[in-house]
Amino acid sequence: MNGRVERYDLPISTPFGIARGTSETSATVVVELTHEGTTGYGGVTPSAYYDETATSVAESLPEMLAVVERIGDPHAGQRIERRLHEQWPDEPAARSAVSIALADLAARHLDTPLYRQWGLDPDRMPQTTYTVGIDSPERMAEKAEAAVDAGFSQLKVKLGTDDDRARFEAVREAAPGAAIRVDANAAWDAESAIVAAGWLEDAGVTMLEQPVAADDIEGLARVTDSTTMPVCADESCVTAADVPRVADACNVVNAKLVKCGGVRAAKRLVHAADAHRLSTMLGCMVESNASIAAAVHLAPLFDYADLDGALLLDADPYEGVPIDGDRFDLRAVESGTGVRPTAAFERPG
């Protein structure tokens, strides 16, 4: 088994704003693992918020792949994950790229779709939201209307500004029939979040995600107690080990492969959440199909999906699982995650 690493700076179709800033490109690193003529693909778009960057990931991956190559078995996922975690415990994004590529390769080696290898039900695929990033109220309204016209019935609206209400109301007016979730990306203090939860609930919002700072678990609990809307922990819940800490402070936890360390780690998180009777969401960054596709195969384990990251790109070097409206079609995948290089995309080198 041998591996290679590619880095891409992928253009986002329109500037993507959240409370912490606005991005115009997605810094993406892709691992390709080849064994007996079969190649698996795994990508990651790391976040500096979690102390990793595309540069740090690209620097760590060659050593990680050397470990993978020494083990040499695409079906030795448990052993490989353990070795990587022992040597790189603080680099979950880099480990995630390897985890995804290995999962893709192992399923392709068996000539089966990844969801079938895991025994998951494609009919349990939740609809994905489409994210409307922070922008002017007029531009957010335009994005919301376009998403609904494209077949998305559920929107995630990013807030966390000094003019949240105007932005939200513009989206609500542009998409009156859409279900709306709101994500503040930890921008509010508890008092401000409780006030916002009041008018958001009155406006019919179906979920409020990460209203307060990641370490403010008491504040998160206060917000949850103040509203009948489901409140979701994202930045406050990174791995399965965080689930007990937030279990009494929220209703939903958001798992992301990039922050927890890959597909096996995401499975542990969802099972921990189930044990604590929490609902679960599977989320993503603005990232390539090289990482989104594996999450799509895992999504039947979750109650909610927010897997629109590749749809927000202007160009992607990889194609992934086909999507019809707001629901991915796992049955269309013949083997692995279904990822394949985009023929027209110009690659490095």
Image (spheres, helix red, strand yellow):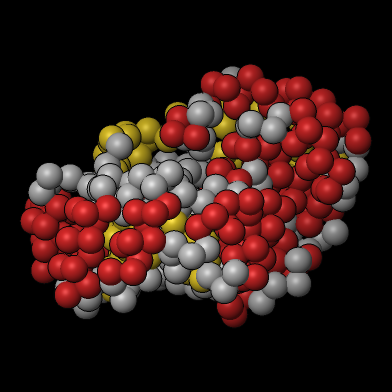
The correct choice, above or below, for 45 with respect to 104 in the image is above
Which x, y percent locates residue 140?
A: 18, 53
Quadrant position of residue 174: bottom left
Residue 341 is at least partly visible in this image: no
Q: Nearer the viewer, residue 278 or 135?
A: 278
Q: Quadrant of residue 70?
A: top right
- Label count reads 0
State the residue at coordinates (66%, 47%).
262
Residue at horizontal 70%, vertical 72%? 120
Residue at 65%, 70% in the rendered image:
275
On screen, residue 301 versus residue 74, left or right, reads: left
Where does the image place residue 171, in percent across and percent down from the top left? 16, 62
Residue 86 visible in the picture? yes
Vertical arrangement, residue 345 with respect to residue 303, above or below: above
Q: Quadrant of the N terminus?
A: top right
Query: Can you say which quadrant of the picture contains the C terminus?
Result: top right
Q: Is residue 309 above or below residue 248?
A: above
Place of residue 190 in the rendered image (x, y in percent of width and height, measured from the top left): 27, 53
Q: In the figure, is residue 51 to the left or right of 225?
A: right
User: In front: 87, or 101?
Assistant: 87
Q: Position of residue 183 (x, y in %)?
A: 32, 55
Rendered residue at 51%/71% (across/down): 279
